[in-house]
Amino acid sequence: MSTNLFHIERLLFTPKTPASNAIPIIFAFPNEYSVGITSLGYQIVWATLAMRSDLQVSRLFTDINEPLPSTAELLGFSFSWELDYVNILNILESLEIPIRAEKRSANYPIVFGGGPVLTANPEPFADFFDVILLGDGENLLGDFIESYQEVRGAEKQVQLRRLAQVPGVYIPSLYQVNYESADGVIKSIQSLDQEIPALVQKQTYRGNTLSASTVVTEKSAWENIFMVEVVRSCPEMCRFCLASYLTLPFRSASLEGSLIPAIEKGLTVTKRLGLLGASVTQHPEFENLLDYLHQPEYDDVRLSIASVRTNTVTQKLAKVLTHRDTKSITIAVESGSDRLRQIINKKLENDEIIQAAINAKTGGLKAIKFYGMVGLPGEETEDLDATVEMMLALKKAAPGLRLSLGCSTFVPKSHTPFQWFGINSQSEKRLKFLEKQLRSKGIDFRPESYKWSVIQGLISRGDRRLSRLLELVRNHGDSLGSYKRAFKELRGELPELDFYVFDDWKLEQILPWNHIQGPLPGTTLKKHLAEAKSFFSNLV
């Protein structure tokens, strides 16, 4: 693909001219340009690095790159999707850099990574990185670069030990993981000595100026979109939800101080606006933001909005979205069962869901995509029946509104109250049950791949022993069969697939991420888990 793609970018920042002694750095996204440039996280980190005169930054994607330095000192990856690890390993090999950190001498760049995959659970990938950045990049990135500057000419071990002192900077090689046996549970996770922090603290940005696009291009996956982060985290705290628990506390962008100025700047280069966040409509001044966007001067702006909370779907919201060329909205309801929603802490009733559909239709929207989930802890067959009944009630209440239900399988996530549960092995059957029931009634049902959920579960709860497995799978292909084949080849060297994916773990068990301090302590997560279990039909 032509590097002319870079020439059609419209930048919303001014890169600095690198100083003569600037650090040569490659900043990579392990996927194609159109995917990477649509990642707001990648855009922000790239712009932050490019606005420093002490760095000389070259971007690298799987299909295109800027001219690369002959001897980079730092090589960074923004890691957003688990299976992109294959591309990370491919990129390392193409640059003639050893895949495993332990095999890299001082002649190789320091390989670092950040992003949601690594912040959630870095352990399956720990052996591939010299440095992992945990948490929000606003302050962490500058702290990392400045600390590296202090030890730039030192031996690699000196550099890594210095970087380990920075909050949010995790150096996997400085931590020893011991197991009860080769294929047993974790016995202990310890830093190598007292100078290395026993716990790595994820870094959290607490300001009220959140992210906004630094580049707009017609070649992004969402053509010419300007994205602005309205909120970060989610106040709802559904007990399975990584996006809520891992990113606490809930923060909202200042409306007058940052949000509106960012939008005005973005709309000077494009007429397509995306409002991002796990719970956009729960911004405390969302009504005022709607009024602002409803002004006649923005009549030609196309507005996209991330998933909205059900009880915030008003006729006014629907009218504004319709007027701004949005035809549908997305709502996560998880289930039609009140009892199951109590278990997961989804503060929502079916009457609210039905009212949201009525409001959406009255306001002019054409469709709603609902998100559901099967295999949630405590789920019974009656809960599936309740989901079918809810969808039929919606169809009756809002005739003519196109309804679809996208449905995934519950996957346990680190730092959440449900991290101790395994995937429900009945989930695939439950997806097929819903599919049969709903499609026969004319409702569009879109199940996500159960096999992909199993792979997600493996990586989500994986420890360092998985790195060898991931290397094998890379050679076999990324199907579930390849993972099972790799487990057979490594039998006796790590636990079975069931241990990682389907088993419920004991509360006293040492988790792979025990040495990484999330927003809430384990005691709080266990309390939230106990509250969930109080609603189970059959207590175990």
Image (spheres, helix red, strand yellow):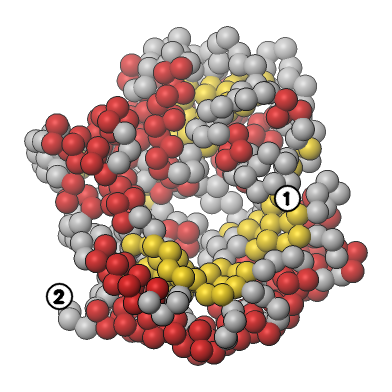
Q: Residue at x 53, y 86 (%)?
A: 354
Q: Residue at x 40, y 43 (%)?
A: 82
- Cα–Cα gap, marks 2 and 1: 49 Å
Q: Which residue is mark 1?
A: 226
Question: Is residue 497 depicted above or below 505 in this figure?
Answer: above
| 203 and 92: which is toward the camera | 92
Q: Which mark is residue 115?
A: none
| 74 and 481: which is toward the camera | 481
Task: Please identify the quarter of the rendering in which residue 506 is found.
Answer: bottom left
Q: Earlier in the sequence, mark 2 or mark 1?
A: 1
Q: How many residues crowd mark 2 within 10 Å: few (<14), some (14–19), many (20+)? A: few
Q: Which residue is mark 2?
A: 540
Question: How many numbered badges does the structure rendering display?
Answer: 2
Residue type, mark 1 in image: Phe
State the residue lying farthest toward the right.
Answer: 297
**Secondary structure found at label 2:** loop
Q: Residue at x 76, y 28 (%)?
A: 7
Where in the figure is residue 505, as x and y percent of width and height? 19, 58
Task: Please identify the quarter of the rendering in which residue 482 is found.
Answer: top left
State if disc 1 and disc 2 touch (CB < 8 Å): no
Question: Is residue 488 depicted above or below 496 in this figure?
Answer: above
Where in the figure is residue 221, as x and y percent of width and height? 62, 45
- Residue 370 horizontal side relative to residue 230, left or right: left
Where in the figure is residue 485, as x and y percent of width and height? 18, 36
> If the image is split into quadrants, where does the N terminus sit?
top right
Question: Is residue 270 depicted above or below 111 in this figure?
Answer: below
Which of label 2 and label 1 is nearer to you? 1
